[in-house]
Image: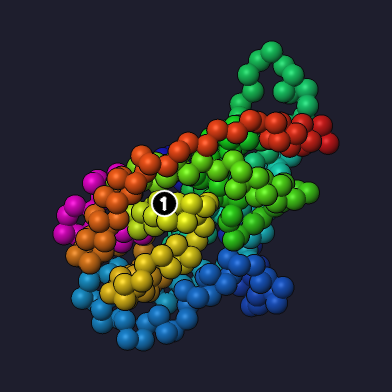
Amino acid sequence: MVRVPHHDTQFYRNYRKKQHDIGRNNAISAHANHRTLVILWKVFQFDFFVGTIEKFKIYKISLIPVQTIWRNVVNCRCMLETIKEQLRKLEADHNIRILYACESGSRAWGFPSPDSDFDVRFIYARKKNDYLSIHEINDVIDLPVNELLDIGGWDVKKALKLFLKSNGPLYEWLQSPIIYMDESGFAGGLQQLMPKYFSLRAAGNHYLSMALNTVNNDLQGEQIKLKRYFYALRSALACKWIIEKQTVPPMEFGKLRGLVDAESFQTIVDTLLKMKSVSDEKTFITSFPVLDEWLNETLAMCKESMGQIAPNHQPANELNVIFRKYIIS
């Protein structure tokens, strides 16, 4: 993943100017009540520290200074405006129309760290004539990644093809609790089709593969990255949801964890969430046997059950209607 030196980018200069302006005014607008602000505010709540700080020391958590956490809260409104500016600039630079843009990654899943970047994903449409050319058009747009922003998007044609295949990340984007743009209810139209087009088998195998890869590659030592635990748990819970509820799994970790009744599991997860809310993305912790055992048992059950789920193949008629609607309008 390419890291662009932030001091060389116009984006970073604009961002720093906005920080200065907000600091000078010493205020956060009462209207800046976006859900991202709520998430960042929760990070700052002092009850996260009470009764858990000693545990963090035991697990050698790399704590983020309180000043840094507060600075993240203050800068939230600035980031929201910066993200929208970047999206508008993409529209102008690439001659596209963004139909939908949302937050993906840990902020939308519900377990961000104070230093988590913003993972912005979008779906866009080009002019009708671009789709009528004999030349293939680029169906992906990515901006260089920096320490604050990771922005990337798919052409609407590519997105609809992946929707037909029950692409896991796309179905998550459409459920994101943090939405930056949604033209004419684009996401709502696809959300109505999700139950019909969603393939339990395809998505289940996707989440099962993700969970197994994370467990086998990242959770084998005594010291493991805290965020990798959440990646494994979220994927395993999504697969379990598909098998038990036979529906599209929710994006948010808080809803997925409700599948588990065990108090020991929930207590440890609560502790890890508090740890992550005040630690950086590189934090390592000691593994938890209770979680390791749950992951192994759950993934074994998922592997055994997945083969019994029938595939779901649907015609693309309704998706073609959506495609034509947004490239012609």
Whether residue 304 sits left or right of residue 126 in the image: it is: left
Which percent across, then down, holds residue 251? 51, 56
Name the residue at 48% across, 48% down.
146
Amino acid under disc 1: Ile
- Per the image, the residue denoted by label 1 is 243
Which percent across, then down, holds residue 8? 52, 45
Q: Quadrant of residue 34?
A: bottom right
Residue lying farthest to the right in this orientation: 329
Of residues 14 and 107, the one drawn nearer to the viewer in this rendering: 107
Name the residue at 67% across, 59% down.
81
Residue lying farthest to the left in this orientation: 222
Q: Which residues are magenta?
A: 213-231
Which percent across, then down, holds residue 54? 26, 82
* The stretch drawn in magenta includes residue 202: no
Q: Quadrant of residue 263?
A: bottom left
Name the residue at 53% across, 75% down.
41
